[in-house]
Image (cartoon, grey):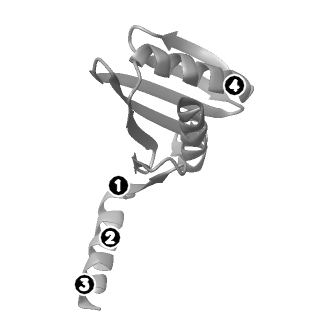
Amino acid sequence: MKKTIVILSIYLISLFLTGCVAPVIVAAGAGAGAAYSLTADSVSDNFPISKERAVEVFSQILKNENGKIIIVSISEGKIDGEIGKKKVYFRAKPLTANATKVVIKVRKGYNLLPDKESAVELYKKFVKVING
């Protein structure tokens, strides 16, 4: 009971001081047995694919969602796009020759507010395509 009160107090103090809290949550991802990191404004995970493949897959997901690609750079592992009024940011950073860290961020409300629900949905679609 004391531990819960202490954690809740720390959470409320940080919320009051900073205006927001960006907790990191590790959860099971899309039934794949993978673990992903979820913050207030992004989802990230490591995949056994190349950076180029990650960019190709995510650009196709954006197209399937009737999204608009604003910037795509395979060499930088970067996609900036929109789905409706939401801004979507995708980054793929190579870790090794066969592993890539993927970060998906979605913002709404004039690019001010994080939309983690949409980020998680796009992540699940990405995992589904990768795991085929």
Q: Marks 4/1: CA distance?
A: 28 Å
- Judged from the image, the secondary structure of the residue bearing numbered disc 4 is loop
- Judged from the image, the secondary structure of the residue bearing numbered disc 1 is loop
Q: Earlier in the sequence, mark 4 or mark 2?
A: 2
Could you classify mark 3 by the number of other residues whose Cα lies within 10 Å: few (under 14), some (14-19), or many (20 or more)?
few
Identified by mark 1, the residue type is: Val
The single residue placed furthest to the bottom in the displayed view is: 1
Tell which tag, 2 or 1, sits nearer the viewer: 1
* Position of the N terminus by quadrant: bottom left
Q: Which mark is residue 3?
A: 3
Tell which tag, 2 or 3, sits nearer the viewer: 3
Q: Residue at x 61, y 37 (%)?
A: 125
Identified by mark 2, the residue type is: Tyr
Task: Name the residue tied to disc 1.
Answer: 24
Could you classify mark 4 by the number of other residues whose Cα lies within 10 Å: few (under 14), some (14-19), or many (20 or more)?
some
Identified by mark 4, the residue type is: Gly
Where residue 72 appears, as percent x and y from the top left, is: 52, 12
* Residue 38 in view: no
